[in-house]
Amino acid sequence: MAKRAFDLFWALLGLVLLSPALLVIALAVKLEDRGPVFFRQVRIGRGGRPFRIWKFRTMGVDAERQGRAITVGQDPRITRLGRHLRNAKLDELPQLMNVVAGEMSLVGPRPEVPQFVAHYTDAQRVILDLRPGITDLASIKYRHESELLAQAERPDEAYLRVVLPDKIRINLAYAAQASLWSDFRVILATLGLAPAPRIPGTH
């Protein structure tokens, strides 16, 4: 209950305080190519239930049909504005609406697309017991994930076999010791306002 109250308070406050910036970003996305402002993609949430995530659109229209489910390096599907939004993580701000709806938390494992969840082992599926979040320690560690995957010969396989298992490991270890204070520290670290808490399993 305390975590849900924490999420709801800060998500609602964030939507109110950031509403002018959200409107400016929405207008800029619309003016760039006249396409939809938001990108709604099916992700797998708590208990294995699918939901649609809110993001500012950072790729061309119908980009999902034109390539892989992950972005790798200088993905040509990303728009000029979209690249700036992604670098600053501003494309994730509409997920505050997912938090208000109870589909996500401020801090929790990033929700994956169904095609990757389908490959989870029984041990990895434990991650679905947690409410997904806008940010987490794994997101901080893999802040430059697309550049990392660009170095792999088979990016999709590298993500599925190396990056994703490590993300799950980090999130399960974090969840075992999480508190509202540690969540707050993760948020500050995501914003670049404080050092990231120690990643579980590292020295």
Image: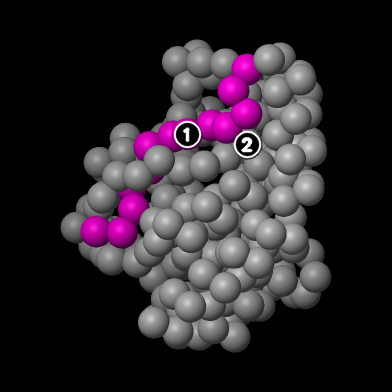
Residue closer to the observer: 89 or 102: 102
Residue 199 visible in this rendered orientation of the protein: no
- Relative height, residue 106 to residue 182 (above, below): above
- Relative height, residue 39 to residue 91 (above, below): above
Where residue 40 is drawn, which disc sits there? 1
Chain part drawn in magenta: 35-47
Is residue 44 magenta-colored? yes
> Which amino acid type is marked by label 1?
Arg
Which secondary structure lies at badge 1? Answer: strand
Which residue is farthest left? 122
Q: At 49% across and 59% down in the image, what residue appears?
A: 99
User: Along the horizontal axis of the image, is 201 left or right of 129?
Assistant: right
Q: At 47% across and 64% down in the image, what residue appears?
A: 105
Residue 39 visible in this rendered orientation of the protein: yes
Residue that badge 2 annotates? 56
User: Along the horizontal axis of the image, is 134 left or right of 112?
Assistant: right
Q: CA distance from mark 1 to mark 2?
A: 9 Å
Which secondary structure lies at badge 2? Answer: strand
Pointer 2 local density, CA inside 10 Å: few below 14, some 14–19, many at least 20: many
- Relative height, residue 195 to residue 76 (above, below): below
